[in-house]
Amino acid sequence: MGRFEGRDPPETVSYEPASVKDLLVEMKDTAELLLDLSYSAVLHGSPTVAHEVLELENRMDVLQMRARMSLMLAARNPTEAETLAPVLGVVAAADKVSDAAGDIAKIVLEEIGLPEAMRGALSEGVETLVRGTVADGSSYAGRTLKAIDLESVTGVRVIAIRRDDDWILNPGPGTRLKRGDVALLRGPESGVAEVYPTLSGEAFEPAGPVDPAIEDLERAVDSIVLMKNLSELAVDLAYGSVLFDNEVLAEEVTNLEAEVDALQARFEAWTLRAAATAEDPIALRGLIHLGVATEEIADAALEITEGVIRDIGVHPVVEMAVKESDEIISRTAIGEGSVLDGTRVADGVPATDVSTSVLAIRRPDEGWLVGPDLDTTLRAGDVVISKGTRTSTTEFGRLAS
């Protein structure tokens, strides 16, 4: 299938003066949104969400082209070309994540098929994400997100808004919802069940539980879920390594990418072995498709770290872009007497209605601890690399001090 088959013809892109930092911010936010949407489209078997992925993928293509144009014009001498080269890597990596997300969405749109066991496993690793249109009679219509205060009350975030043909990718407290807006909500299922009817005027119908009763595929399904988690962690750590110019974090990304490669090899072997006894081997095509796309996300994470690994240095424009994106990465020390001292990471940190994801912990006597849902307890003296909204990051810093 051609790259643009099934999509609108690519639009002509001409140079427009634009801030590279703003383009990088939008590309990072778009890539992260695409990951959320693509896995959710597969989980729920939703062609509607999958089509939103392809629309955003087309937008990313335009952003990438404009960023490349601006970077080419910015390099006026060999020294500037050297410092800007890794920025091109960051641009290419975001586009690679976008392409991988589009490939995941096509599992739904092209009806490639996916075993129900896969949906059951994904449901444990994907936060609830729904798409709803703001109804005429919604009490949210005409109000700002700050006034509605969804995140602190329900744990649900409005992660993006599509208004006609325009996207608001980084809605802030002052963003006002309007009737007819298509809002993307993400959060715990209980919170979404409370918010969705108020927003859309329609009942929320969660997906029913799926019995993963395919014993032959158990190891393959477990592997792809782990690959997904490790790939997303690698992307987050890659941006963290750039933000803090931290070679140790960049090396962790290299290790994660190698682990994902090894997992993919074993995953493919287990899937092919299961095909020999499966009633419908064709239904396993989606698994292979998902594995390849997920591995490409880990490859993209490695590209982000190239400037750090090669000791070229991190261009300030990338640091600013990471700091100003939708979900921000922070570095926080747990102080003596902090209420977080003794908090178990896997139980949620901080233990409030707003979420913070702990990506890595540097412990004075153990070095770096890296992994999703770290099964460890925070201690005074830990340095924590975390990711969250500005609201949750501020709260996390307050609790840590």
Image (tube, rainbow, N blue to C red):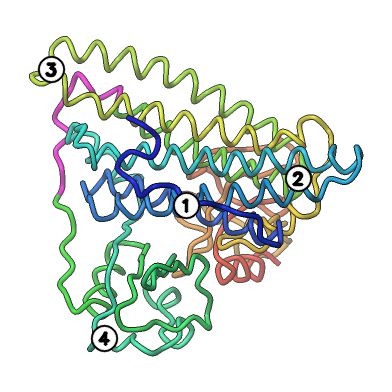
* Front residue (pair 378, 100): 100
Specify which label sits upstream in the sequence, 1 or 3.
Answer: 1
In the figure, residue 176 lies in which quadrant? bottom left
Please report whichever mark, 2 or 1, sits nearer to the chain's N-terminal start. 1
- Mark 2 or 1: in front is 1
Residue type of the residue flagged with mark 1: Glu
Residue 266: image quadrant is top left
Question: Is disc 1 surrounded by few (<14), some (14 to 19) or many (20+) residues within 10 Å?
Answer: few
Q: Which residue is mark 1?
A: 11
Q: Secondary structure at mark 2?
A: helix
Mark 4 highlights which residue? 138
Residue under pointer 3:
278
Splitting the image into 4 quarters, where does residue 362 fall?
Answer: top right
Residue 221 is situated, as x and y percent measured from the top left of the image, at: 29, 28
Structural crowding at the residue carrying mark 4, measured as other residues with C-alpha within 10 Å and reported as few (<14), some (14–19) or many (≥20): some
Q: Is residue 213 left or right of residue 80?
A: left
Q: Residue at x 31, y 50 (%)?
A: 40
- Disc 4 secondary structure class: loop
Mark with earlier residue (1, 4):
1
Q: Which residues are magenta?
A: 209-220
Report the residue at 43% width, 31% height from top: 227
Give the number of the mark in front: 1 or 4.
1
Disc 2 packing (10 Å; few <14; some 14–19; many ≥20):
some
The residue that mark 2 highlights is 72
* Front-most of residues 154 and 298: 298
Mark pair 2, 1: CA separation? 21 Å
Identify which amino acid the numbered label 2 is placed on: Met
